[in-house]
Image (cartoon, rainbow, N blue to C red):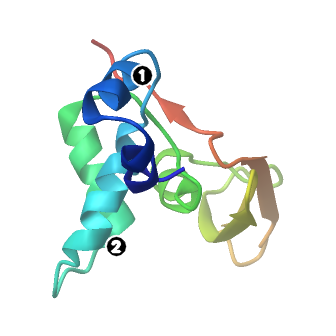
Amino acid sequence: MKLSALKKLFSSVQIERALEFHEVNPLMVAENIEFERKERGSTKTFRDRALDFILKQKVPFTTTGNGPYECFQRFVKVSCPHCDGTTKVTQGGGSGSSYSVQYRCENTECGTEVSIHTGFDGLSVRPKE
């Protein structure tokens, strides 16, 4: 349920008290803010800008519904299982509760593809405190 719908049912104080006992994914909040900001001329996507902000703040986060691609691209390095070469994220996608990211070996003679399948919240980051 969206916050606007909750505000029709409960007071802001009641909502805040309820949220005190539940985890809120800061990456989700940052993505929403960056999406609405619509930064003109930026070469980064709103998800990349949100990740930059969260990483700078050094807070724990989990990937969001449509955000695993950017996280895997930045944080998960996969070695080719055949030639031990480097791979690059070539595509990713999913729906609802599952997500897939595909890597391809950068060695043109090899070209092995590796796929990782996970839930949309399959990657969590917890910085050292």
First of labels 1, 2 by sequence position: 1
Cα separation, mark 1 vs mark 2, equals 32 Å
Taking the spot 75% from the left edge, 51% from the top edge, the residue there is 97
Where does residue 31 sit, x and y in percent of width and height? Answer: 35, 57
Give the amino acid at mark 1: Ala
Residue 33, numbered circle: none
Where does residue 4 sit, x and y in percent of width and height? Answer: 38, 55
Where does residue 68 sit, x and y in percent of width and height? Answer: 57, 54
Q: Quadrant of the C terminus?
A: top left
Residue 65 quadrant? bottom right
| Residue that carries the numbered disc 2 in the rendered image | 45
Taking the spot 39% from the left edge, 36% from the top edge, the residue there is 10
Nearer to us in this view, 117 or 75: 117
Q: Dot 1: within a 10 Å radius of its alpha carbon, few (fewer than 14), some, or many (20 or more) residues?
A: few
Q: Nearer the viewer, mark 1 or mark 2?
A: 1
Nearer to us in this view, 27 or 42: 27
